[in-house]
Image (spheres, coloured by chain):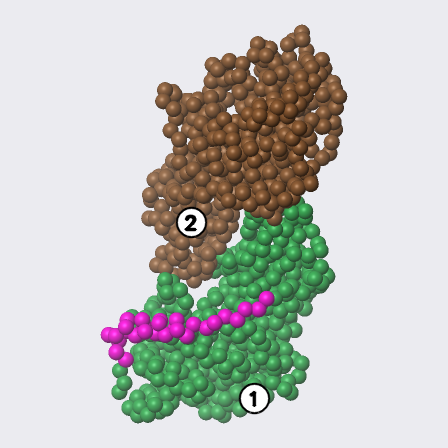
Chain colours: A green, B brown
């Protein structure tokens, strides 16, 4: 059976880092100008009850003057990621003192109401896209050094020597694929809008890495990468960036060989994050990439993938439950009430199944046999311990909790048959006691599971219900978190921290291609 | 008689601009580290009733960690001008979000108490050396793009991903002469301290131009230049920077040929400031430069200098009074109650006298004769209209105001004899009804006038009284404005705007060399 040579890990990591650098995507730049001056208005039908109304064409910008205390909001028409530049002068060019500006870049209108003194989020306030800057001499074109993810830009004149004129405010937008893929023919208006917002979400996240969100955390996560790679396969087909990302994650393996859950481009920033469920999906990521783009990536990482499977297998006890550990974060979903035992075990089955397919692809019979045997044993265990035959659902933990998570991974792993799966997922979806998907991340796997069971119309309807509702609320990119029953949802205790363009929400395109 | 060819002004200005560029001084860089952590304390014996007390050696900086909300103050030991760099990392190098800092650079301890929301100054709030900045990735060395004038630096952690460590905070200090000239032998401790503070003040203002103040306005003014050139002549003897500055001011002449009162290095910033009293001292500046450094500069600007004299002569009426005009700012001093008629007329005499000497130097007999004739005529007029024979003082305007300004310019111009002058200036200095010098700018000319009348011991005592008191209040550079009876003096309605290192205060050195 194939063994991963852990003693050579540091050597492998250096090679992978080098290959990640070689595969570094090139950013495509595009200058974007604002479309409209706008104002913030209360609107109960929009996201967080705030919308904007246009006031005037932004073409009027250069003919207006501003003084200390003035502020205005520009609408760039759609979500962008990039660097702002401000071309400014003082009327009559008498600039005898510095000009001081405050800017606030916002993905959603609500963020334009930000007041720093009222922040109460649990993540760094540094994520808020508020900036103060001064410029000593005008006329000048000031290009800000930091990147923003935004549709709206609020500009406030804190101080200036006279009447300030903005000759131009522009954004040097960037993405590795800085364009939108047109929707497939035959989609209606709502589905077209969903396609475009999904595609735009991926475009914005597709920077040097496939980021989770360009506002926050601006970082590569293996779980998000899996969904982005799936969506990329039906839209941009940018195989190079997927490969860059896999090499970067592999270059950040833990000492025991577990692939990193997240990674930074900057080699000086240390990754401390390892999620077994992300490591377990690695074989599936390689298998899907093989089917779309050839097997060279899978060949390079075959040993490492098998190592993930064997390593994660040791994290479960004889009852198929997670062995408690402080070393790892078992994720599945941002839902505090979720019991993760059965979902994680099903992801383990999913991992074994995909690894077996990969082994078969490369003719590694011994490895495939081991995976199949382990699958059978663990599947038997789960049937005994976590199958509620009466209801026809998988249950989890001592409380025998029913969740969408358990059912969808039960289906995707191949533990449940198509008929069992359809019944089980419908039960979970429609049962008020069941634990439902909290994030679009898990929501995607629910859809994929229903799709696998043949419920294509259900999937299309659910997409229109969930992602379509975000469109109705004003989204032009899909959000990190959304629930129909909570207009202010925020995983980090302050909605100003929320990411309104988040990779794991871009997947509806997969079901429309 | 020599005529300035005004029709060729634009051509001359282009040549002068080019020559100013050729003479551009080279900045000397020196890395400076903080000496002490310190805290702000109330102290009624110090400037603005605020002082600092040392807390610990700044060598401890790199062994401390800071979290959101923490703040500290560093004392760099003396006044510097330069660019800060912050070498930082997050403990364990897990930097998953941006770091956001607020800094406040302060010349005097009082400025460390700044609260932006309470600002009420009449100049741009942009002058306050407060900055917010964010850095996305640590470890890094962040060098801020703007220049600061400071001795103290307050650092506040607005947000950061974990425990922030400052491996180093440094300042890349700059000056065209980045060192101090040792005091002449034989000075006592107070005089040595006054010399060093004067010298440091000039060092800090000696950037690309001779600036008025490195915090504010960071700009070349002809009046300040005159005093800086005098002090430079006994300290740094940096003749090149004086010549650079003269070319730059000349390159900014008004359409009628009046030399600019101030100028910017950046040719895109328009100068709109013309002060007749500054234009009138131009011949004296050239004459003094000739005596110290040779006559090539005076030769180049002889025609322009004579043009200033003839032009400014037209600004006075047949009674020797200023003809009211919206075109010019008659300055003399920042003292709202000052009647400027006689002081300005005496500066006109000073101008004629110095121009005559310059003409004689170059053998231009006709020009010298004209100057002498004009001097005699105007002197006669002033003796008739503005001389109070009873008190033995010059008076100004309908109110027959007695001021230090009238007496000192009466002396420096040669209108008054040594004996008349000594009596007149003593009368003004000791008379409660008289208008006294408000700024160190006019204070300098008062000293120079007393010196000219042979009152050397009086000058030395006045320096110890005025500049020495600034030292006692905590100055290590001399201030833009100071009055013994007003600890909070501010020409711009908010002491946070004041410049604590201002060129026109650097002149005591002249009387100590």
Q: Is residue A160 magenta?
A: no
Res. B366 image quadrant:
top right
Question: The residue marked by circle 1 belongs to what chain?
Answer: A
Which residue was labeled with disc 1?
A456
Of residues A47 and B92, which is closer to you in this image?
Answer: B92
**Residue at 70 percent of width and 54 percent of height:** A64
User: Can you give x and y, in whole percent of width and height, for residue B20 in the image?
Assistant: 54, 42
Q: Secondary structure at mark 2?
A: strand
Of residues A255 and A450, which is closer to you in this image?
Answer: A255
Res. B235 image quadrant:
top left
Q: Is residue A160 above or below residue A112?
A: above
Q: Is residue B463 visible?
A: yes
User: Can you give x and y, in whole percent of width and height, for residue B38 in the image?
Assistant: 40, 38
User: Can you give x and y, in whole percent of width and height, for residue B273 in the image?
Assistant: 65, 37
Q: Which mark is residue B268?
A: none
Q: Is residue A511 above or below residue B283?
A: below
Question: The residue marked by circle 2 belongs to what chain?
Answer: B
Q: Secondary structure at mark 1?
A: helix
Q: Which mark is residue B85?
A: 2
Q: Is residue A79 above or below residue B513?
A: below
* C-alpha separation, residue under disc 2 versus residue under disc 1: 58 Å
The N terminus of chain A sits in image quarter: bottom left
Q: Nearer the viewer, mark 2 or mark 1?
A: 2
Q: Residues within 10 Å of mark 2 (few under 14, many from 20)?
A: some
**Residue at 43 percent of width and 59 percent of height:** B137
From the viewer's perspective, tell me whether residue A380 is left or right of residue B420.
left
Q: Which residues are magenta?
A: A4-31
């Amino acid at each position: 059976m194939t063994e991963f040579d852990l003693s050579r890990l540091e050597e492998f990591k250096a090679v992978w880092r080098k290959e990640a650098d070689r595969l570094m995507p090139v950013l495509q730049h595009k200058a974007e100008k604002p479309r409209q001056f706008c104002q913030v208005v209360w609107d109960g039908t929009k996201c967080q009850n705030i919308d904007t109304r246009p006031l005037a064409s932004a073409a009027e910008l250069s003919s207006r003057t501003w003084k200390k205390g003035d502020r205005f909001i520009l609408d760039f028409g759609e979500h962008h990621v990039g660097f702002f530049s401000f071309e400014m002068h003082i009327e009559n060019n008498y600039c005898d003192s510095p000009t001081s500006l405050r800017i606030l870049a916002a993905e959603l209108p609500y963020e334009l109401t930000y007041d720093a003194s009222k922040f109460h989020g649990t993540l760094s306030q540094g994520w808020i896209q508020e900036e103060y800057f001064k410029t000593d001499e005008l006329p000048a074109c000031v290009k800000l050094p930091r990147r923003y993810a935004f549709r709206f830009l609020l500009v406030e004149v804190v101080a200036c020597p006279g009447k300030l004129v903005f000759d131009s405010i522009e954004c040097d937008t960037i993405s590795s694929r800085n364009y939108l893929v047109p929707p497939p023919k035959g989609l209606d208006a709502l589905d077209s809008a969903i396609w475009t917002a999904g595609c735009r979400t991926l475009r914005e996240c597709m920077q040097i890495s496939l980021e989770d969100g360009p506002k926050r955390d601006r970082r590569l996560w293996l779980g998000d990468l899996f969904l982005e790679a799936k969506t990329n396969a039906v839209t941009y087909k940018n195989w190079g960036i997927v490969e860059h990302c896999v090499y970067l994650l592999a270059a950040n393996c833990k000492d025991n060989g577990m692939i990193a859950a997240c990674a930074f481009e900057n080699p000086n920033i240390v990754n401390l994050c390892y999620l077994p469920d992300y490591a377990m999906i690695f074989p599936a990521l390689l298998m899907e990439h093989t089917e779309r783009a050839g097997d060279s990536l899978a060949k390079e990482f075959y040993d490492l993938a098998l190592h993930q499977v064997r390593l994660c297998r040791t994290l479960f006890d004889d009852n198929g439950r997670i062995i408690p550990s402080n070393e790892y974060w078992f994720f599945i979903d941002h839902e505090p009430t979720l019991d993760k035992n059965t979902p994680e075990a099903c992801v383990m089955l999913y991992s074994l199944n995909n690894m077996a397919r990969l082994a078969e692809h490369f003719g590694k019979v011994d490895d495939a046999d081991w995976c199949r045997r382990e699958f059978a044993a663990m599947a038997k265990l789960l049937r005994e311990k976590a199958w509620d035959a009466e209801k026809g659902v998988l249950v989890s933990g001592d409380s025998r909790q029913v969740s969408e998570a358990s059912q969808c991974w039960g289906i995707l792993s191949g533990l449940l048959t198509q008929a069992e799966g359809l019944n089980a997922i419908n039960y979970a979806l429609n049962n008020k006691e069941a634990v439902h998907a909290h994030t679009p991340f898990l929501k995607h796997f629910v859809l994929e599971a229903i799709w696998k069971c043949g419920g294509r119309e259900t999937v299309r309807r659910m997409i229109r219900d969930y992602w379509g509702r975000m469109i109705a609320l004003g989204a032009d990119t899909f959000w990190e978190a959304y629930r129909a029953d909570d207009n202010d949802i925020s995983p980090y205790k302050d909605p100003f921290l929320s990411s309104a363009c988040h990779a794991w929400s871009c997947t509806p395109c997969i079901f429309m291609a």
